Amino acid sequence: MVDIQVKNLTKFFTIGENLLEGLSFEIQEGECVAILGRNGCGKTTLFKILTGEMDYDDGEVYVNPNKRLGLISQIPRFPEGYTVEDVLRSAYAVLTATRRKMEALEAAMAAGATPEQLKEYDALCNRFQAGGGYEMDVEVDKICNGLGITADQRTQLFDSLSGGEKTRVNLARLLLEKTDILLLDEPTNHLDLKSVEWLEGYINTFKGTVLAISHDRYFLDVVADRVIEIVDGHAEFYSGNYSFYMEEKQARFNLQLKQYEQEQAKLKQLGFTVERMKGWGINNRTLYRRAMSIQHRMERIKKTEKPKTERTMKASFAQKDFSGDVVFALKNVEKSFGDRTLFSDVSLRVEGGERIAILGDNGTGKSTFLKCLLGEEECQGKIQFGPTVKWGYLPQIIQFANPKRTLYDTMLYEKNCTPQTARDRLGAFMFQGEDVFKTVETLSGGEQSRLRLCMLMDEKINLLVLDEPTNHLDIASREWVEAAIEEFEGVLLFVSHDRYFIEKFAERIWLLEDGMIRDFPCGYAKYRSIMEHEEAAKPVVTAQPKPKKEKPKGGTKEIEKLVRRLEREIEKQEQLIAQLDEKIDAAAADYQELARLMVEKETAENTLMELMEQWETAQEEL
């Protein structure tokens, strides 16, 4: 069954310049489809058209009228004084109204009920139960726990929340509404890793239809069944997730380029033949007619369009040589706000060339930790940098000293460079033509990040500190930032929820949780397997029965035999644990096998401890 159908959709904002032109696609019931395309290609406009918020100029749009459709990017207005709990409960408006009718009937029937009242009450009860009325509280708690909406936050006024928090609450409300068709516009932007993973699990078990606009490549790999890319106003189709899309797109580009080159070579050869035959045919009408026939055939050949390569930015970080071993060291660092301690007793050491990701839930203090490190926030403890260290910092919330200045003037005044140098550097970051005369305050979040990076890359640094560097950037811009970072040879320290970015760069993980920083000297994949082991081992570990202590009979000789036997068993047990360690390393990608091996290792270690206790007891008796 078709849930959404778009035929020859056209939408323009300036006459003669169509944003969407002849866009056509179908979405079947139960599909999860990723909508991709560069910023400004019309993805969000398409969603607004599907919801009826925006009109279109030509074509046909069909959305199954029997299905409930919800758009995540829309944050509806609620009455003044509404708390987060009120907003969440508004998902059950129909059920709440049914319950009020039931309560009114119960009051009316208190003195005696008529057959009509009993019949109506029975119908209301059935409707309330069928709609999940008795599971409302459980569902609200489940969704809030999954998306990290705390009990304290549920009592706050909705209007007092930040934009990101409102987006998260609205996402929870739509999930509670049991929407049949979900339109997700950048749903992961304001979620931490745990919440994103929970959302992925929810979507993968969701029985309805999902259309997702996202720049989170890891997210798209997990949830998308297929990809629709909007290119020059029309749709291109890929029957797989993001990784498939990338491979297939490159394969199509290579094929089209090969066909184009072959056609051009053939046309060039035919053109040469035509010109030569025309020369020969000056006095030979037969040859001349044949030349003209070949020329007409060349004109009728359907020519392959030369594939376009996307315009990319070309820039790299200016680097300063680093001498010494230690880039920075922290000893007993602590930061508190009133009674709340964000982190304490942090002692870490960073050496040259390391690439470190700081992970943790929202609100744990990751950005504050970076600010403490760089001296923007006061903290207790000792932070010491190497003598030749110079850092560059890209904060999560980007601010400029004079936002009313143009991009061009910002480069001239803040970087103290020549007009031509300012133009060249801005051009390398895809600020070209009239764009350089825009004021900074009119830029989007992604454009402001790009401008700050443009300014940052000019500085000679050997420590690069990034706080959510890929926020607000489209996929093409993210890939460009990654290419620039790959060439950077200094120390990289970053906070990010972009798992694709983390997996690509992190060689060491700092996990900030429960007021402490756990140091994992490994990449993201191994870190994830370690966390999976720990999580899997928690519920399945059961107390093992203690081996009975053997009491030797027959005096000292028997005790000596027992000691030697226990030593052999201890040696075997140690070998078994070593073998299990090798198996655990080999099974890093198989989480079920890892969980089983971790439990087996824990059992073996418990047995080893018991054998050691018996050996100590026997030694004492000797």
Image (spheres, rainbow, N blue to C red):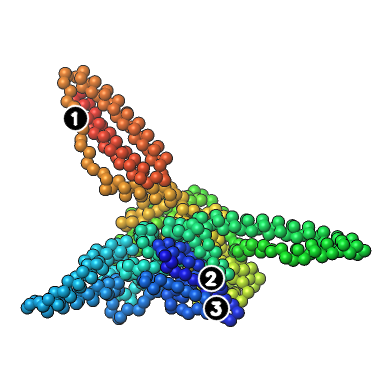
Dot 1 surroundings within 10 Å: few (below 14), some, or many (20 or more)?
Answer: few
Which callout, 2 or 3, points at the residue further toward the start of the chain?
3
Q: What residue type is disc 3 on?
A: Phe
- x and y percentages locating residue 320 in the rendered image: 56, 56
| Viewer-side label of 2, 3 | 2
Q: Which residue is mark 1?
A: 549
Q: Which residue is mark 3?
A: 12
In the foreground, 289 or 279? 289
Position of residue 402 relative to residue 486, above or below, is below
Regarding residue 525, the answer to whether it shows in the image is yes
Q: Secondary structure at mark 1?
A: loop
Is 464 displayed left or right of 136 in the figure?
right
Q: Which residue is mark 2?
A: 23
Q: Secondary structure at mark 3?
A: strand
Answer with the quarter of the image where residue 274 lies: bottom right
- Verify CB contact (< 8 Å) between mark 3 and mark 1: no
Distance from Cα at disc 1 to Cα at disc 2:
78 Å
Quadrant of the drawing holding the N terminus: bottom left
Distance from Cα at disc 3 to Cα at disc 1:
84 Å
- x and y percentages locating residue 483 in the rendered image: 56, 57
Q: What residue type is disc 1 on?
A: Lys
Which callout, 3 or 1, points at the residue further toward the start of the chain?
3
- x and y percentages locating residue 581 in the rendered image: 37, 38
Which residue is located at x 43 percent, y 77 percent?
52
Position of residue 542 relative to residue 328, above or below, is above
